[in-house]
Image: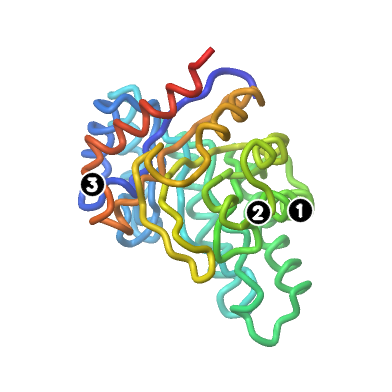
């Protein structure tokens, strides 16, 4: 990658505010860009928005000098025969919206966990997920849009190791990794600087968030401001700087899911941005 690290806010942190309010807020906080929850209860509903409405949103962002960093939808099931084509078609629509918004990436889950598909072999879950992501990527690539497969719980790609394997199997130049380190740490395959080094060849986008992890099994955690939880962020951010990564770091501020854990975004997201910049700018 060439260029500098840029910073984005995630609309997960701004429940109840529309996309225009978020554009203004994130500009005031000091972000360069925006990652958008694409869902019926998100700031963009890909199943309802028209191309004209998307162009209107782009114009509002450009007026503020803001970019769209990533569109994050929740379509994931490439396995179930009744859901597979719907998942692929809806992800293609998200890619089309991204192209209108001049957004370089859409997030994809790395499929679904095999145990959620009783009677389907692991190898079939894997190959159907890989082929489904590939089909979306082929379409998105023609629009100039990339696919960022996230390291995330509930998918085939919680660890860096497994995410890299999916990316390699998909085999498309516009497909890379959305490095959500907090989940990588919970997975426990790679941690700290070693996780960053393993992810470096595939990085397209980075999520930050902190929490206090009380137990892995069963999973019990409480969302926290950056630096106030248990995630090994100082080590990870220093290692990320050493890789030469030059893309977006996005604050996946989890207020939508855990409204009582976190302060309002004007306070919490501002804190998180300053925290991250401190480590990335350190000599």
Q: In which quarter of the image is residue 26?
A: top left
Give the left or right position of residue 8, taking residue 183 as reference: left
> Residue 139: x percent and y percent?
63, 50
Mark 2 or 1: in front is: 2
Q: In which quarter of the image is residue 174?
A: top right
The residue sitting at 53% across, 49% down in the picture is 107
Rendered image coloring scheme: rainbow
Mark 3 or 2: in front is: 2
The residue sitting at 49% across, 63% down in the picture is 215
Q: Are marks 3 and 2 in contact (CB under 8 Å)?
A: no
Q: What element carries label 2?
A: loop
> Residue 72: x percent and y percent?
46, 50
Give the left or right position of residue 175, taking residue 50 as reference: right
Q: In which quarter of the image is residue 172?
A: top right
Q: Which of marks 1 and 3 is nearer the N terminus?
A: 3
Q: Is mark 1 on a helix, strand or loop?
A: helix
The residue sitting at 68% across, 48% down in the picture is 190
Q: What numbered label is drawn on residue 151? A: none
Mark 1 or 3: in front is: 1
Vertical placement of residue 212 versus 59, above or below: below
Q: Are marks 2 and 1 in contact (CB under 8 Å)?
A: no
Q: What numbered label is drawn on residue 18? A: 3
**Residue at the spot of label 2:** 159
**Residue at the spot of label 1:** 165
Q: How many labels does the image show?
A: 3
Neighbours of disc 3 within 10 Å: few (<14), some (14-19), many (20+):
few
């Amino acid at each position: 990658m060439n260029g500098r690290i840029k910073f984005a806010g995630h609309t997960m942190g701004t429940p109840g505010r529309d996309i225009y309010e978020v554009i203004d807020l994130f500009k005031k906080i000091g972000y360069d860009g925006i990652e958008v929850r694409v869902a019926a209860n998100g700031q963009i509903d890909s199943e309802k928005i028209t191309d004209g409405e998307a162009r209107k949103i782009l114009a509002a962002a450009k007026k503020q000098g803001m970019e769209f960093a990533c569109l994050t939808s929740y379509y994931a099931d490439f396995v179930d025969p009744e859901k597979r084509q719907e998942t692929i078609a809806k992800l293609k629509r998200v890619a089309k919206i991204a192209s209108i918004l001049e957004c370089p990436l859409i997030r994809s889950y790395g499929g679904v966990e095999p145990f959620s598909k009783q009677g389907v072999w692991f190898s079939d879950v894997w190959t159907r997920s890989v082929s489904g992501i590939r089909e979306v990527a082929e379409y998105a690539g023609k629009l100039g849009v990339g696919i960022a497969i996230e390291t995330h719980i509930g998918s085939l790609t919680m660890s860096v190791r497994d995410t890299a394997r999916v990316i390699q199997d998909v085999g498309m130049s516009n497909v890379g990794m959305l490095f959500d380190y907090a989940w990588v740490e919970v997975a426990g395959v790679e941690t700290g600087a070693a996780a960053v080094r393993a992810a470096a060849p595939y990085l397209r986008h980075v999520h930050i968030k902190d929490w206090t992890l009380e137990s892995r099994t069963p999973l019990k955690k409480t969302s926290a401001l950056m630096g106030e939880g248990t995630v090994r962020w100082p080590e990870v951010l220093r290692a990320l700087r050493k890789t030469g990564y030059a893309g977006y770091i996005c604050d996946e501020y989890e207020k939508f899911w855990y409204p009582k854990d976190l302060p309002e975004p004007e306070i919490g997201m501002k804190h998180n941005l300053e925290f991250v910049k401190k480590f990335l700018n350190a000599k």
